[in-house]
Image (cartoon, helix red, strand yellow):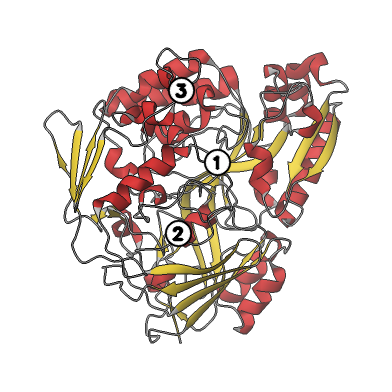
């Protein structure tokens, strides 16, 4: 999703950004990899277990997509390529400084650095950032992802442009001819001014998302995730080849002179959606590949640890913490998972320790709540045991479990998901249910999750499927309001994979978002507990780690606590 998805056959979540969190393993930093390799050359990368979802900068919302776009995007505010906590501190990149904010907190003014250029040689201006806002909100796009983060509500004129709220079809202010620009955003030369409807404390952090980078001012709207394959980029690299299911090639932007490095001339990514990662692991060990950004396959982790150790100085195996909560979504929109008793029963029936164990050592730690350590509002609690409790599950579920059909969605290319689906099938059968394993499209796993099932034809949908969330930015709003607001549910392009739609909870989330400081944290802590006792839309089971093996020739390893993956542009080969 943060990614929000971490780049491994095991960690394929939807939201994207990552956090410096307290975990049992050490953070992989630049100290764990030699940094003496010469600059230049070609970085050879594999991605196993999944294709790229999209590299359209305003439609990308999966962690592996964002990890690539991080190399091509130029942001107003960005994260530096530094290890540890230093890499999670924003700095002005395209902007000359942090924004000037009005006394009422509602007007942000950015001044763009002069001399910045796209790979085509075209100059970067404020209009290039204005266009990013238009594409993230436009109803002409495949998905208005900005509405999930309420950008339409935050920016003056956002709802009129996006045709949401009162401006939606059927609303009191609807018009068949909506404005073609956002009235609250003004781009004049190198000055970008953004007017907000209210103070939004997290707004600067939001702008560090990959959605808000400089793009061509005439980049068209896209009605599908694959319509825009290549576009001019103003970051360290640009996309020279884009085949989401087989090959992506990044080449150095010849006009790049920013703070972030572009240490290799090219980054070549071979994509193997149907691979379980074991072949690419062998290629990495032989030096034929430099890194599989799908991560080390779960069945191989123990052997890799035995051979290479964990986070050793100048080592090859790297483990780092994430802000990712991994879960099994329960589709609240169709039977039988629209029944609270069934959803509670499934939470008791599945062993979190068993699910984590299937992913091998250092995969993460058990959890049965939404928020993760380090996010404001996090307070550890336990509602469901880390081990299966079938007796309680049967008691809670009662007659609603008997003979109930359950579609279990999984990625057949993932050894972890395949084994987990088999385990889930067994546990559901133990409850007297009738589970069916449903293979997802390995080229586009998330399409099944993003598409709303219909009550008239529920067999086409899923009842339970693997997913997860990684922080877009470090605020509880990004977990709760983004994922659980029923008002955002559409026919396609959804982030609310639970299809949870509860007006009372929507209002409580609105109220929490309006608070600040300690009151805000307490409000979200209450929501966290209420979610898992009163509503239970999913089965959270783990706060995850990332696990990578590099070839011997890779240097300057910097693990990004924001992405939960290495900074590819910083890696050297030699």
Circle 2: element type: helix
* Other-residue count near label 1 (Cα within 10 Å), few / some / many at <14 / 14–19 / ≥20: many
Q: CA distance from mark 2 to mark 1?
A: 19 Å
In the rendered image, which residue does mark 3 sit on? Answer: 527
Please determine whether, in this image, residue 452 is positioned above or below residue 125.
above
Circle 3: element type: helix
* Other-residue count near label 3 (Cα within 10 Å), few / some / many at <14 / 14–19 / ≥20: many
Q: Position of residue 203 (x, y in %)?
A: 29, 38
Mark 2 or 1, closer to the camera: 1
Q: Position of residue 476 (x, y in %)?
A: 40, 33
Is residue 414 visible in the rendered image? The answer is yes
Q: Position of residue 546 (x, y in %)?
A: 53, 58
Q: Quadrant of residue 486?
A: top right
Is residue 377 visible in the rendered image? The answer is no
Q: CA distance from mark 3 to mark 1?
A: 31 Å
Of callouts 2 and 3, which one flags the residue occurring earlier in the amino acid sequence?
A: 2
Disc on res. 511: none
Mark 2 or 3, closer to the camera: 2
Number of disc labels: 3
Q: Depth check: 81 or 341 in front?
A: 81
Please determine whether, in this image, residue 496 is positioned above or below residue 441.
above
Q: Depth check: 32 or 290 in front?
A: 290
In the rendered image, which residue does mark 2 sit on? Answer: 69
Residue 381 shown left or right of residue 274 in the figure: left
Circle 1: element type: loop
Q: CA distance from mark 2 to mark 3?
A: 33 Å
In the rendered image, which residue does mark 1 sit on? Answer: 142
């Amino acid at each position: 999703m943060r990614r929000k998805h971490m780049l491994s056959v095991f960690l394929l979540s939807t939201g994207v950004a990552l956090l410096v969190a307290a975990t049992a393993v050490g953070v992989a930093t630049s100290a764990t990899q030699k940094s003496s390799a010469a600059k230049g050359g070609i970085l050879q990368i594999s991605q196993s277990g999944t294709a790229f979802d999209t590299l359209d900068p305003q439609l990308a919302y999966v962690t592996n997509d964002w990890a690539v776009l991080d190399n091509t995007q130029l942001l107003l505010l960005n994260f530096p390529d530094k290890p540890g906590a230093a890499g999670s501190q924003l700095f002005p990149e395209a902007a000359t400084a942090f924004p000037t904010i009005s006394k009422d907190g509602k007007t942000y003014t950015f001044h763009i650095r002069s001399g910045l250029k796209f790979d085509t040689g075209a100059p970067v201006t404020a209009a290039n950032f204005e266009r990013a806002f238009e594409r993230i909100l436009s109803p002409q796009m495949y998905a208005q992802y900005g509405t999930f983060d309420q950008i339409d509500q935050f920016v003056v004129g956002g709802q009129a442009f996006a045709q949401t709220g009162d401006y939606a079809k059927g609303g009191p202010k609807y018009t068949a001819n909506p404005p073609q620009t956002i009235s609250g955003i003004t781009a004049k030369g190198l000055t970008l001014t953004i007017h907000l409807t209210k103070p939004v404390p997290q707004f600067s952090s939001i702008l560090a998302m990959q959605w808000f980078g400089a793009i061509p001012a005439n980049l068209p709207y896209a009605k599908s995730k694959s319509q825009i394959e290549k576009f001019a980029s103003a970051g360290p690299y640009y996309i020279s080849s884009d085949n989401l299911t087989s090959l992506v090639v990044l080449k150095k932007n010849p006009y790049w002179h920013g703070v972030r490095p572009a240490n290799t001339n090219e980054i070549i990514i071979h994509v193997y959606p149907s691979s379980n990662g074991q072949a690419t692991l062998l290629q990495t060990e032989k030096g034929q590949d430099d890194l599989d950004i799908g991560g080390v396959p779960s069945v191989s982790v123990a052997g890799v640890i035995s051979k290479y150790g964990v986070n050793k100085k100048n080592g090859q195996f790297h483990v780092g913490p994430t802000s990712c909560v991994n879960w099994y979504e329960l589709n609240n929109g169709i039977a039988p998972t629209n029944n609270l008793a069934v959803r509670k029963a499934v939470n008791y029936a599945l062993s979190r320790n068993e699910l984590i164990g299937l992913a091998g050592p250092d995969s993460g730690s058990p959890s049965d709540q939404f928020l993760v350590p380090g996010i404001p509002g996090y307070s550890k609690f336990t509602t469901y045991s880390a081990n299966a409790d079938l007796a309680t599950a049967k008691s809670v579920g009662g007659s609603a479990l008997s003979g109930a059909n359950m579609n279990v969605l999984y990625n057949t290319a993932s050894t972890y998901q395949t084994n987990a689906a088999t385990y889930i099938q067994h546990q559901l059968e133990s409850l007297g249910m009738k589970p069916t394993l449903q293979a997802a499209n390995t080229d586009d796993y998330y399409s099944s999750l993003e598409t709303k099932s219909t009550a008239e034809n529920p067999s086409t949908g899923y009842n339970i499927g693997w997913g997860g969330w990684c922080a877009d930015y470090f605020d509880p709003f990004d977990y709760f309001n983004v994922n659980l607001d029923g008002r955002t549910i559409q026919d396609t392009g959804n982030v609310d994979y639970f299809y949870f739609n509860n007006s009372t909870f929507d209002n409580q989330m609105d109220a929490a978002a309006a608070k600040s400081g300690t009151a805000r944290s307490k409000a979200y802590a209450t929501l966290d507990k209420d979610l898992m006792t009163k509503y239970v839309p999913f089965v959270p089971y783990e706060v995850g780690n990332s696990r990578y093996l590099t070839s011997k020739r890779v240097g300057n390893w910097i693990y990004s606590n924001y992405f939960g993956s290495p900074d590819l542009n910083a890696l050297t080969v030699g």
